[in-house]
Amino acid sequence: MFCGFSATGQVKTFVASPLAEQRIEGLNEEISSYSLFELDLIGLDEYVQNDGYSNQVNLDITGYGIFNIDLIHNRVTSSDYALRAATPEGIVTIETGDKIKTFKGYVDGQFHVRLTIDEDFISGFIETRKGTLILESAYLRDRGLSRNQLLVYYNKDDIAEYPNHCEPRLAPGHFTNEPEPKIETRAVGECYDVEIALANDWLMYEERDEDLQEVENHNLAVINNVQSNYDDEFLDEVNFVVTEIFVSTCSSCDPWTSSTDAGDLLDAFGA
């Protein structure tokens, strides 16, 4: 399920130029193969936000290909969306404006694309015949890098282990004691909006250089990427709508328990 595109005006190509230094210390323990580029993120952001934007953009990434992308704005926030921050003085609402940073689209009319773009931020993926290509702002991996630098790799090369996941990532239906699904006859092809609010603790804020905009961009990018798993995979389309992002901006502002006990944490979030 996807909206059509209108194509007017000239399509601009943004070239990602390889960096001389192709290494981020320690990253090979998480990603077996990757590349680093310089990309005009400010120019890309201005282009896709321009009133004359034609819903098309080209990305030329050396060694990976030239991607002619039909890319449209994809609002993942509600009309009354709020960014709220817990501070030592209390909870405040932050003005965010009406800028849509999240995008969705296709390459060659068939390969999915999801990108979140800001003036010094990019995150998302491009599906290709060789696999899913991940694009990230490189400074998120190394704060010493410039904000116009791009990290690119295939998702199959992500070798990081996540021992703190709640459960193994297994295919649906792996529980043998699951009851047989109840089949009901009804019309399919419906679209459902699911409102969701996101909360970030102090550690997330600290990890993102104590920058509210970085936390917001990260949250919106995650939802934009995940949304692609719910548009064509089921009989109906599920659309997530972010109503609020909450961020704790000081170590004493977290409204949750500091306990690492699973039961205590569950009670705190359910309170």
Image (spheres, rainbow, N blue to C red):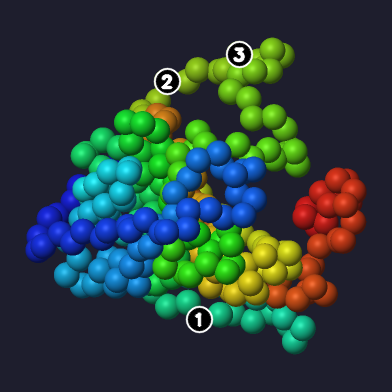
The amino acid beneath tag 2 is Thr
Residue 42 horizontal/vertical position (percent): 35, 72
The amino acid beneath tag 3 is Glu
Dot 3 corresponds to which residue?
Answer: 180
Quadrant housing the C terminus: bottom right
Q: From the viewer's side, name the closer residue of 113 and 254.
A: 113
Q: Secondary structure at mark 2?
A: loop
Left/right placement of residue 104 relative to residue 139 reads left
The answer to whether marks 1 and 3 mark residues whose Cβ atoms lie closer than 8 Å is no
Dot 2 corresponds to which residue?
Answer: 185
Name the residue at the front extreme.
20
Q: CA distance from mark 2 to mark 3?
A: 16 Å
Looking at the image, can residue 170 be seen? yes
The answer to whether marks 2 and 1 mark residues whose Cβ atoms lie closer than 8 Å is no
Q: CA distance from mark 1 to mark 3?
A: 49 Å
Dot 1 corresponds to which residue?
Answer: 95
The amino acid beneath tag 1 is Glu
Residue 33 horizontal/vertical position (percent): 50, 40
Name the residue at the bottom extreme.
89
| Rendering quarter of residue 148 | bottom left
Decide: few, some or many residues near mark 1? Use Cα within 10 Å; few <14, some 14-19, many ≥20.
few
Q: Residue at x 83, y 56 (%)?
A: 268
Q: Which mark is residue 146?
A: none
Sequence-first disc among 2 and 3: 3
Quadrant housing the N terminus: top left
